[in-house]
Image (cartoon, grey):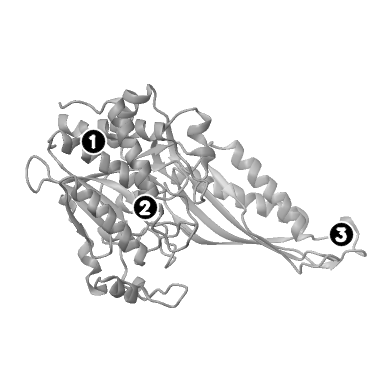
Amino acid sequence: MAALLTAQEAEQAAARVMARCDALAAISATPGQLTRVYLSPEHRRANQLVGDWMRTLGMIVHQDSVGNICGRYEGQTPGAPALLLGSHLDTVRNAGRYDGMLGVLTALEVVAHLHRQQRRLPVAVEVIGFADEEGTRFSVALLGSRGITGQWPAEWLERTDAEGISMAQALREFGLDPAAVGEAKRAQRDICGYLELHIEQGPCLEAADLALGVVTAINGARRLNCTFTGEAGHAGTVPMGQRKDALAAAAEWMVAVEAITTACDPHLVATVGRIESLPGAVNVIPGEVKLSLDVRGPEDGPLAALLVQLLAQAEAICARRGLSFASEEFYRINATACDANLQRRWQDGVMQVQGRSMALPSGAGHDAIAVAACWPVGMLFVRCDRGISHHPAEAVTQADVALAIQAYCQTVGSWEEA
């Protein structure tokens, strides 16, 4: 096996990554902020820059038919299946500079390490900068990763952005053919697995005083619109004991949602994020309350059981208070388990550089969700300051990035021993 990445080399690599994150952050549609959306001029410029960096590492570079930028570092045998590394290059509006980009740029440093040593693995190594993970422009997420897995329904081409530009038109303006989006699909045999490094976007690693953690699963989610229906009445004339106050019932349930979920598996979370009280007058007892419920967890079974318990609690509160309760699910995505073998490889790499490995689920979605429909996926989390993400204050340290690159090189290098 070739020499491992030294601490000094890792520091130099991390400095390059931080500088390149800054360079990509300068490619923005909004002065003073970072906004880079799908099929925009900024998307094109980011792809060109990352493509240039790929070419300096001896990679064969192409942009696929949905706008992903792809670089291939050939294996010992031409045409060998590829180990795919990467993340996304698009952002939310007024974003931070590490969400997505860090995963692409650290992957390039893995290839750089191989290239410096003139080292080839039994598998090819491909780095991909996914074109759209966030769904900021067309309100459909994971467009880039769904492109390579062939999960693009034809009707998506008709979706429009805030300016009324359809996805088909945007593809044409970008220089791509809407009729050719299916050509981005990769054959099953072309890829043997997918590794994604990403900032945690949460506070767990920071709380554990660890730079790195291995992801076990990407949380599934259920989102519901819920309604408590009581009876509106005069705030001054209806006695307290005779009221059917929808807001009081909803408030009781919200506290129960917090308590019940807290008492469950610590990886399960539930959030009431939106509430509307009707008729909304200061001198009228609320007769109807509409609110949202978002429940997430790394395993579908416990997630479903929690949801049943929360809805039963709402029904019980309404029965006791003489109200009615209704709910309607409007969004569902199943949990995505990370591959056990890839988790072990990540853990071994992390143990080499950190001394211990922490396993944790991801509460946010990632390109790995789409990729997992076709190939094994594994993810590594890097600590971020206070767990802040999707915000200009998003931050990582160069020292943590150096450790991450070392672990990444160790993990990818394990294919040499296969």
| x, y percent for residue 320 | 76, 53
| x, y percent for residue 155 | 35, 73
| x, y percent for residue 312 | 62, 51
| x, y percent for residue 5 | 25, 28
- Regarding mark 1 in the picture, which secondary structure is present there? helix
- Pick the quarter of the image with the N terminus: top left
Contact (CB < 8 A) between labels 2 and 3? Answer: no
Residue 350 position (above or below residue 66):
above
Contact (CB < 8 A) between labels 1 and 3? Answer: no
Residue 74 position (above or below residue 169):
above
Q: Counting other residues with Cα less than 10 Å from the Cα at mark 3, is it few (<14), some (14-19), or many (20 or more)?
A: few
In the picture as drawn, the residue positioned furthest to the top comes out as 355
Q: CA distance from mark 2 to mark 3?
A: 62 Å
Q: Nearer the viewer, residue 167 or 293?
A: 167
Residue 28: image quadrant is: bottom left
Q: Amino acid at mark 1?
A: Val
**Would residue 338 be visible to someone looking at this image?**
no
- Pick the quarter of the image with the C terminus: top left
Name the residue carrying label 3: 242
Mark toward the viewer: 2 or 1: 2
Q: Amino acid at mark 2?
A: Leu
Name the disc covering residue 24, or none: 2
* Earlier-in-chain disc, 2 versus 3: 2
